[in-house]
Image: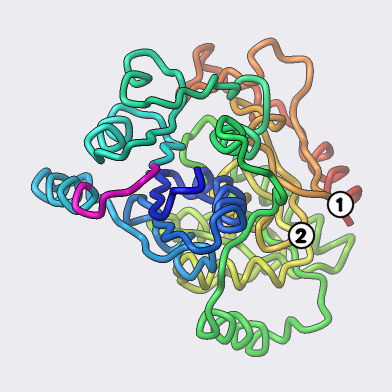
Amino acid sequence: MHHVQKILVIKLRAIGDVILATPVLENLRRAFPQAKIDFLTEKMCAPIVAGHPALNEILVLDRRQSSASWQLIRQVRQRRYDAVFDLFGNPRSALLTWLSGAPMRVGFRFRVRKYAYNVKVEPRGDRVHEVEFNLDALRALKIPIVTRKLFVAVDAGSENFAENFWQENNLAHRLVIGLNASGGWYTKRWPLAYFAQLGDRLQRELNAVVLLLWGPGEDEEMKALAQMMRAPSLLAPPANLKQLAALLSRLTLLVSNDSGPLHLAAAMGTRVAGIYGPTRPDLQGPWGEGHEIVMKNGLPCLGCNGVTCRIVTHDCMKKLEVEAVWEAVQRSL
């Protein structure tokens, strides 16, 4: 490993998964302070690692254009990486790793994909948190693990964006609690009506400012949530990922489904009350200290990891009472 001068780390998506891979980067930089370390991801996730002090360059994969994919492969081969770490492990990332031509190709022992690697890592995704799963790729080469901290860099412009929003809405010295009702799968989403009841209670009993967070394509849903609430809420402004990170860093607490913003808030040092059902918080929960998890315990289908509900009734979310989430909020505060 002392001959390694060029390293490529691959984590194609999603936003939360890329955030949970950031501890790998700092550990690599500490182990190889003089190396060139690059990161390959998809366009949507690139802002998460933009400005990371451990990285030299970010390579972006555009899945929509096959010609762009082949250009990227040529680009990767021309850079002659000494080591490639595939932290994603799907057929596309395995092929990219194999075609890189790197003499050291590190990846997880998944079915046919394992043949793309010459350093095969035993996957523990069903036993350890995703942060530790990613770090196993370093352990396979006996690279020291000196930090497990998440890191997302936020630029000055994004900080100013959040600060201006805080000043315009007189949020300084207020208890500001964010609600994030989004989720990549519908199975991970707690009903909007329940979020509305929780938001009303936060204002009524805690005199909190309730900030409704949303991303691309979610504005109408958040407006509907605001209309369901009896008390007035505050709709977050349109924001890119860096601006969202700056907003999240100013919250007292975020109440969220399992989603990218949940992990982004944790990376920014904000406490999270995470709502879980089909995904397992011990494997994909908010990383760090002080977070709370709320689930409808006792259901045999918990942790099914299904993008659709096999029993149709969606009990893990529909039977999760507002009172249970309220208690998690009180513990967090």
| Element marked by disc 1 | helix
Q: Which residue extends farthest left?
A: 67
Q: Is residue 154 above or below residue 36?
A: below
Residue at 50% from the left image edge and 63% from the top image edge: 34
Q: To which residue does mark 2 refer?
A: 253
Residue at 82% from the left image edge and 49% from the top image edge: 289
Relative side of 107 to 276, left or right: left
Tell me, for residue 124, which label it has, or none.
none
Occupied quadrant, residue 244? bottom right
Q: Is residue 135 above or below residue 173?
A: above
**x and y, in percent, of residue 124 in the image:** 60, 22
Tell me, for residue 332, which label it has, or none.
1
**Dot 2 and dot 1 residues touching (CB under 8 Å):** yes
Relative side of 83 to 311, left or right: left
Asked if the magenta segment contains residue 80, the reply would be: yes
Q: Quadrant of the C terminus?
A: bottom right
Q: Nearer the viewer, residue 95 or 13?
A: 95
Q: Nearer the viewer, residue 121 or 149?
A: 121
Asked if the magenta segment contains residue 217, the reply would be: no
**x and y, in percent, of residue 132 in the image:** 65, 35
> For mark 2, does the 10 Å Cα neighbourhood hold few (<14), some (14 to 19), or many (20 or more) residues?
many
Q: Nearer the viewer, residue 134 or 19?
A: 134
**x and y, in percent, of residue 323 in the image:** 83, 39
Q: Amino acid at mark 2?
A: Leu
Residue at 25% from the left image edge and 54% from the top image edge: 79
Q: Which residues are magenta?
A: 77-83
